[in-house]
Every structure is written in C-alpha cells, then in structure tokens.
Image (cartoon, rainbow, N blue to C red):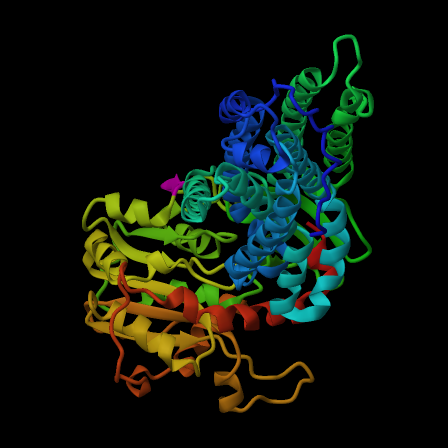
Amino acid sequence: MAQLHSPAAAPRKRAGKSSGGSDAGARHECKQETTPTPNNLKMAIAGPAGPVAMAIAISFLTSSILSGSMLHVGPQYLEPLYGNVLPQLGFLHGVAASATLGGVLGVACWRRIASSADAASVDTRTGRALAAAFNTAALLTALAPIRASYVLRHSGRLGPVWGPTLTHCALAYPVFGAVGFVTAIAAARMSHVRGAPARQAAVFAAYVLAAAMAAWVAQKRAPWQHACHGMLTAAVYMALSGLFVELLVGLQERASAVAAQAPGVRPAALASRPALLRFAPAAATVVFVLTSLLGDARCTTHGVVGSTAKYHVHMRDESVTGWVTVADEHERGLRLLRSGHSIIGGHWNSTRESIFGVFYYADAVRLVRGVPQANERALQIGLGIGVSARSLHEQHVRVDVVEIDPAVHRAAVEFFGLPRALNAVHLRDARGFIDDAPAAAYDYVVHDVFTGGSVPAALFSREAVAQLRRIMRPAGVLAMNYVGVPSDTRVLAHVTATLRTAFEHVRLFGEFATEDESGAPLSRKAQMDTMVNMMFFASNRPIVFRKHKPDRDTIRGTMLAGMLHNEIPLHRLPTDGVRPLTDRWNPLTQWQVATAVEHWHTMRRLFPEEYWLAY
C-alpha cells in the first residue's frame, strides 16, 4: 500500500495570539506563556480535539467490523474455485503481514504528521490521513469483483496453493493493509504525549490490542453473508466512514481557521478545499458498487448464468456451503451437482444412474446378515443428489435426511429425482441433529459429508461416533463415506480407531479405477496412491454380506457385485501412536490439506476450467 501524504498544515498562529482550535491542555499552556514558541506548542499537544476524537472512534469501530467481516468473506470469495481448505492456507499469516505493513506505513505517516508545530494542525492532518485510507480502501474494495473476474480466470495456472495467495493479494489483503494503517495512526494520535515515551508506548500497545480483540469478537459474531455482497458492503461502509471522518475534519479545520484568522477574513484552508470534493470518493464507491451488483453474475445470489457450447446451467444459488449449481454437460450427457469446488453428485442423463458408483456401496447396509428387514428406518447424513436416500426409499425403507444446505436439497428434488415423500427432511447441522435424536431409532445410518476437499472434523470424532451408535438399533449398520488416498494410512488408522470406540466390527472398501486416463491398466500400488471414494462399514454384529443378486446391466449391480473385491485390509494399518479423534483433539482438518490439494487437481482433470468458472 502506497504511503498516504497528508495535505499541508494549517497556517501557524501569530505570536501572542491564543489558539481557539487547540485542546484544553494547549489553552492552559497559552495562558501561562506570554510568547509561545514552537517547542512550547509541541509540548502542548496531548489528547485529540473533539472532532478528531470522534473520527478515531469511528475508525476503531469501522476497522473492527471490517476485519471481522473480511476474515469470513475473503476465503469465502475463493471457495468456488479452490474449495474450503486451500483459501485458508496461510490466510491469517497474510492478514497479519498486510496489517503489519499497513501499520509500518501508518507510523511513517504519523511521524510526518507529528512534525507539525501545533495541536490543531496535528489533528487536522490525522483526520485527513484516516479519511484518505478509508477512501482508498473503499475504492479498491468496490472494484474487487472486477479485479476478481480477471485474477480468478488466471490464478488457477499457479496451482491450488499459490493461486489463492495471489487472489487474496488482489482482494482481501489491501483491506487489512488499510486497517493496519488506520489503527497505527489512531493509536499514535491517542498515545501522543511528548516527553513520556513509556506512557506513549503503553497507550499505543493498549489501543492496538483493543482493536485486535474487537476484530476477533466481530469475526466470531459476524453473520453469514453472500461473498460478493459482503465485499461490496465493506466498500460502502469504508466509504461512509471516510466521508464522516472528512466532515469531522472539516469541523476541525473550520474551528482552527476561524481562531487563527482575523475577523472578516475567509479561512484559506476552507477556500482551498471545495465541500463537494469530500463526497467524491463515497460517490465513486457507490457507482462502482452498483456497477458490480448490476453487471457481475457472481454478485447475484441466484438465477441462471446461461449456457455455453459445453454446459447448460439449470440452477445457481450461493448458499451456506458455497455456490450450489446444477449443470448439464452436453458432450458426455451428464448432469452435475456442484457445491463450491466439488462435485457432490451427478447422474447420466440417459439412465439417471449415479456417475459415482461408490454411492451404491451404501446399499450394502441391507445385505449385512442378521439385520432385521421389517419396519426398517434409515438416516442419511449429507444428501448430495440423494442416490442412497432414493435407493433405500425405493426398497421401502423409511428414510430421514439431514442436510445443512437448503439449496442442495432443492437441487436434489428438482433436478435429480429425490422423492418428496421421504419420511422426514431436516435442514440443519448434522452434529446437532444426532446429539438431539432419540436413542435406538435407526437400522441404518449413511454418513456422507465430504465436500470441497475435506470433511467436517466434528462429525468424525469419538463423541460424534458415540452419538451415532446411540441412535442406532442393536444390530444397526453404519456406512461412512471418506475421500482420500488409501496409502495415507495415518488418517485411515485414526478414523478406524475412532469407529472402534463405539463399534466392534469395522470394514473398509474402496472404489478403485482399473485404468488410467490413457486406458492402460493400473497396478494395485497405483490404485492405492490415487484419491478415491472409500466406504467404512461399522456395526456391533459381524459384518458379513449376503450374496447380492446383481441387477441386470446397472451401475448399482456392478458396484455391489464387485465391492468385496475392493476391500482395504484394516489389519495392515499402523497402530503406533494411533488414538481416537475427539472433539478436543482432532487434527483431521490439518491432515486433509494434502487431500484438498489432490482433490483440486482431480476436479480439474475431470472437468475443465471453463466449467469451474461458470458459477
């Protein structure tokens, strides 16, 4: 962020005149000194005058709210192209570096401001610097969607790690740089007491600490909002703050100029700065915001983007899990359900069968021997396009669905044939649901919550697994989908250990490709080193599957018939240092970074960049 230069100081007072624009401490000194000197005036500078004190208060409030909002909106803006893990990598470090750089520039600017000869000039230039920072940041943020449309189109060439970093540099980091600049100047002005360096340092540190704590509180309490709307709201908020600070500086200038000029003389400071110029940055910000709202498809929260030669978009909606879109790919005859940077389901338009065969593995819960098959009831956690829920429903199982995102449920019903006559649909957080659900309610639980390159760790803890066991009947079976690399035995070992805290028997099966992209057969080692969908089965009864009568020429029949050949032996997993995941100790999110990177590459291999940019 370039250093902001303040306008020239207001005219200095003539010797022997009392300053009406100084603060109380300055007036007291003027009464005691018959002929004030510049050094005496500098010593008189203490707390800021009323208007500038209000400007500093506005700056504190604005910086805190903006920081809290942008900590959410920054990664959220990138989620459709990078998932929910990769935009968070190094984000807080970048925020800290941006704020620190802005703070260094703010301190440098303050040193120039503090060289003024009198308190009124210091207050005026302080207010001008605060307003300039807010106005600059407001304009940059209002233009963020325009910059994003270009940066996001090309940042993917840098890969899943540096791509998000570059995009943050163009979108979020300038805002945090402005926050650091404003915080440094405000803290320096509040702590400015000449001849008392210890007190000055203490007040400065206290102000910065209070600003950081306020930003943390604002981040914790910030409500969910649409990414583009959040960005543009931040721009308007900064523009209004800059305008209010400008008006307060105008009051300070008027008071100082009137006191410094002879009666009947128009103050030069006011004559040199037309009042309309104070409104120009805010007006420009509003124009840019309206341009983005009306002209950028990413700033509309729902509706249809349109069709291209390869894709036709049926639905798009920015919801709580990211952008949810339904699109047809003409070339291969697919219909896809996308949530952010993840395909959470899809079917072949010709047969309406799932393009991901692993979802049919969940049907094997009804093939486990010893499970009563009368008045069966199942719980589906995480809906996708509803493959498992629909299949179980068609087998006369009463199905309850828990899905956190209403847009996903709407897409499954309207575009993928999910029956409306399911037993119940709960649009809420799954962890809260299983904590509240009655005991021994379900024969089967299908657990599939992977999206965007990761799973919510809270649904893979020992406490969550214990609750799943509580709501299942004695002979119940759990089917838990997990996406990862089978050779990553650390994660599989910990998830297995967690499941075994509640279930005596656990088995794992993978959906392995038999050929690579060129059609050459894959070795077993290559299969184990490739990201695949895997399905855990857990129960307190031995997991022995009855022989399946294969459906004729269906993907479901093929997958169930071949599932037993794709078992991943759990007895080969390491045991040293392995312990169950808990709510208090759950490094699953950190361990999934490599999975998120591999998932990003996998998605880009399956579908071209053109598809991912169409949201």
Q: From this viewpoint, is residue 553 visible?
A: no
Q: Residue at x 71, y 57 (%)?
A: 152
Q: Is residue 273 left or right of residue 50?
A: right
Q: Is residue 49 above or below residue 524?
A: above
- Nearer to the camera, 54 or 77: 54
Q: From this viewpoint, is residue 536 visible?
A: yes
Q: Residue at x 75, y 36 (%)?
A: 7
User: Which region is colored magenta?
Assistant: 423-428
Q: Is residue 321 left or right of residue 210?
A: right
Q: Position of residue 247 (x, y in %)?
A: 67, 22
Q: Position of residue 73 (x, y in %)?
A: 56, 46
Q: Position of residue 538 (x, y in %)?
A: 27, 68
- Nearer to the camera, 341 or 50: 50
Q: Is residue 168 magenta?
A: no
- Nearer to the camera, 294 or 173: 173
Which residue is situated farthest in the top direction here?
264
Residue 132 occupies which quadrant of the picture?
Answer: top right
Residue 370 occupies which quadrant of the picture?
Answer: bottom left
Q: Position of residue 524 (x, y in %)?
A: 49, 90
Q: Residue at x 63, y 83 (%)?
A: 516
